[in-house]
Amino acid sequence: MGFLTEWISHIITFILLAVVIELILPNGSFQKYVKMVVGLLLIVVIFSPIFRLFTGDVEKMIASFQKTEMVQNESIENEIEKKKTEIQASQHAYILEQMAVQMKTVVAEELMRTYGLTIADLSFVIAKKNEIQIPQDIEKINVVLTNEQDERAISTIKPIDVHISSDQTNEETTDLATFLASKWEVDEKKIAVQLERRE
């Protein structure tokens, strides 16, 4: 923008100077030569940006254009990569959520009939990788079981009785882990069962 204002001010200054010269010169044959020279100089002043372009370092200008283009391309690539990562993360979250729903559905009826328990919570621990492969990269499945049938139907808060150090509870959680592993077709070592007994 500064270059444009400088160029226009040069043209205006030169035109004013040409008018003053024309007014100072006496009428005669010499005046038409002066007008021709002033006209040629005005053309030079008008086309000076083009001359400056050709006299400048063209390679430097091209390099600067290429550099700005490379920086823009790099920032666009970074933005695309960031969006791709965000989309993949949301896809993985959605897949895990749908897996959890399906896994609950597969065992819900038999779990209630055999053990009198329902799945209160089901969560996954996933390996930290750039490219996650589900279900291969699931390191652990955390299952919280409760004897409540429908937790939404609770009108008052009931105390939770959690048995932590009991051999019977350990055997029961192992038995439940084995049951869940067989139904879900996963390694039993990947399943961590937590029981919440409610009165």
Image (tube, rainbow, N blue to C red):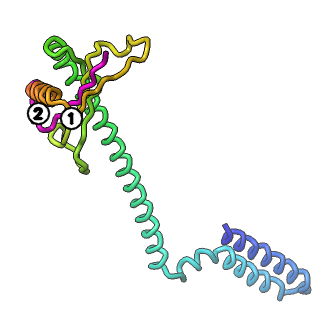
On the image, the x and y values in percent for residue 155 come to 43, 11
Q: Quadrant of the N terminus?
A: bottom right
Residue visible at 10% across and 24% down in the picture:
179
Q: Mark 1 touching mark 2, by CB under 8 A?
A: yes
How many residues crowd around disc 2 within 10 Å: few (fewer than 14), some, or many (20 or more)?
some
- In the image, residue 83 lies in the stretch drawn in magenta: no
Residue 119 appears anywhere in the view: yes
Dividing the picture into quarters, in which one does residue 147 lie?
top left
On the image, the x and y values in percent for residue 171 come to 12, 28
- In the image, residue 191 lies in the stretch drawn in magenta: yes
Please report the bounds of the magenta region as a residue range: 183-199
Q: Which residue is mark 2?
A: 186
Q: Height in image: 145 above or below 47?
A: above
First of labels 1, 2 by sequence position: 1
Residue type at tag 1: Ile
CA separation in Å, label 1 and label 2: 10 Å
Question: In the depicted view, which residue is nearer to us: 66 or 92?
Answer: 92
On the image, the x and y values in percent for residue 53 come to 55, 77
Q: Which residue is mark 1?
A: 141
Residue 98 appears anywhere in the view: no
Q: Height in image: 50 above or below 181?
A: below
Looking at the image, residue 79 sits to the left or right of residue 178; the answer is right
Q: Quadrant of the C terminus?
A: top left
Asked which secondary structure carries label 1, the reply is: strand
Q: Height in image: 38 above or below 167?
A: below
Asked which secondary structure carries label 2, the reply is: loop
How many residues crowd around disc 1 within 10 Å: few (fewer than 14), some, or many (20 or more)?
some
Dividing the picture into quarters, in which one does residue 195 lie?
top left
